[in-house]
Amino acid sequence: MNYLLGYDIGSSSVKVALLDANTGKCLASATSPRQEMEILAVQAGWAEQRPERWWQEAINATQELKTSYGFDATQVAGIGITYQMHGLVLIDKAGKVLRPAIIWCDSRAVDYGNAAFEALGEEYCLQNFLNSPGNFTASKLKWVHDNEPDVYAQIHKIQLPGDYIAFQMTGELQTTVSGLSEGVFWNFREQAVAQELLDYYGLDHDLLPTLVDTFAEQGRLMPEAAQALGLAAGTPVSYRAGDQPNNAFSLNVLEPGEIAATAGTSGVVYGISDQPVVDPRSRVNAFVHVNSQPDQPRNGMLMCMNGTGILNSWLRKIVGELPYDEMNRLAAQAPVGAEELLFLPFGNGAERILENEPTTAELLGLSLTRHDRTHVLRAAQEGIVYALNYGIDIMRAAGVQVHTVRAGNANMFLSPVFREAFVNTANVTLELYNTDAAQGAARGAGVGVGLYASPADAFGGLERILTLAPTPELQTQYQEAYARWHQALTQQILSTSTISHHVEQHAN
């Protein structure tokens, strides 16, 4: 029997899945730690984690998997890795981490990206990078260059979170074109490293790792890594991709017009195009998709909302550590629109769909005699859906067709309220599948070692378990509620912009 292992390196936990390569069925999985990993916030708007913790939790999860499902490690044909996007890991010549990783929801580099967007020219950036440099990895590296010069001087290579885990496994310092694109290190027009941005930022080109294909043997397990994991030395690592391209891959979303969504730590809608589609205000972003080839480009347009999982977990603490399925049951007891209670689900770092303006979470319209926890829970789930729909509207305006959306049967898509609100607000058909990110990484590993002839051949065992379409009556109710929410968001944006303008005037 051939097995495949997939690792999902998240900011909340690390998950590993074991697949039967012949049937495509997931045999077992394990997650570590049981409680969410801490995100360090030394200052407001900052978000950091220690990469060494990711590696330790990968070890812990693998050992738990081996204990629960006694597979023969010598039969593992390949290992795949997916990871939280946009993180910055800094490695010295000895292979040691120089500082905590600056992760995806960290906001410190916003001003650097905005300045680069203006200096290089908005048209130039959008034509070549398909994005503003924004708050992405290149801008985070510029922040280190300017604010921690002693650290910058010691950098041998930079890595994305998945690159770091692959390095711990294989000793190889590598990344992918898709990975470079997610950090705005890639020039789409030139099909090369974005040297113009590196030069503008004054960053050393040699800090970037060697490029490898997304689906390919990228190294083999070193003996010490194999011993720590309880796997066989020499096992190939044969796939790596950021979490959202990988989530799309896990759902067999590979071709133009196909759409994937997820609602875990962040809320994301990700659509495939064969054209260089851009949003002029860079509120949604384009990256190189996992199956893109120079002669057959595939780009993923991504809208991301940071405050998804953190809002749900925050509410769980507030309502008494209830299980999430009980929170979903309580949310369903309140009516559509939560009797005009509105939740703006922001406040977890700069939101790109709001042009990286500072925002906060807000609960609006609360009546102490009318609303109870069921209304609050429903308003939160609806608020996350409305934020996703706000991004979907931007994607549609940029030319992405959004009709049918595929998602894994996990996280907030387990909630009937969330699913119903999503399809009726966005006017889409939702398909739920029996997959997750770790399983997608395992399938990718099978492509990388040649067990599957192509990415499209990797989906044996993938099953659709639910299809949900909008209904006219519910569409009317949800879209009326969304209009109220949209008006509240517009007022918040105007208020924030006015405050920012006054602060700038005072500073000048």
Image: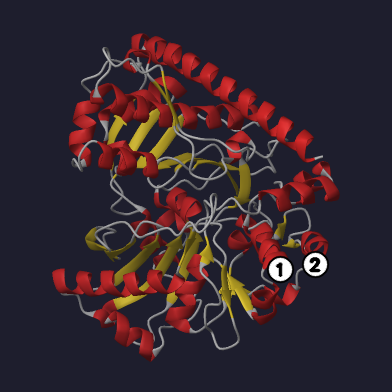
Residue 150, relative to residue 427: is it above or below?
A: below
- Crowding at mark 2 (Cα within 10 Å: few <14, some 14-19, many 20+): few
Q: Is residue 57 visible?
A: yes
Callout count:
2
Give the x, y percent position of residue 485: 48, 19
Could you tell me residue 423's position as x and y percent? Answer: 39, 25
Q: Amino acid at mark 2?
A: Gly
Residue 96 lies left or right of residue 282; in this view the side is left
Q: Amino acid at mark 1?
A: His
Residue 60's place in the image compared with 322, above or below, is: below
Quarter location, residue 458? bottom left
- The residues tagged by marks 1 and 2 sit, at their Cα atoms, a distance apart of 8 Å
Identify which residue is drawn at 55% across, 66% down.
160
Q: Read off the residue under disc 1.
A: 145
Mark 1 burial class by Cα count in 10 Å: few <14, some 14-19, many 20+: some
> Is the Cβ of the residue at disc 1 closer than 8 Å to that at disc 2?
yes
Q: Earlier in the sequence, mark 1 or mark 2?
A: 1
x, y percentage for residue 7?
37, 65
Q: Looking at the image, which residue sits at the far front?
A: 506
Looking at the image, residue 370 sits to the left or right of residue 354; the answer is left
Secondary structure at numbered mark 2? loop
- Which quadrant is home to the N terminus? bottom left
At a point 35% along the width and 65% down the height, the residue shown is: 6
Provide the residue designation for mark 2. 202
Write the residue at 24% across / 63% down: 30
| Numbered disc in front, either 1 or 2 | 1
> For this rendering, which residue is in front, 202 or 40?
40
Give x and y (percent) for residue 357. Answer: 63, 37
Classify mark 1: helix, strand or loop: helix
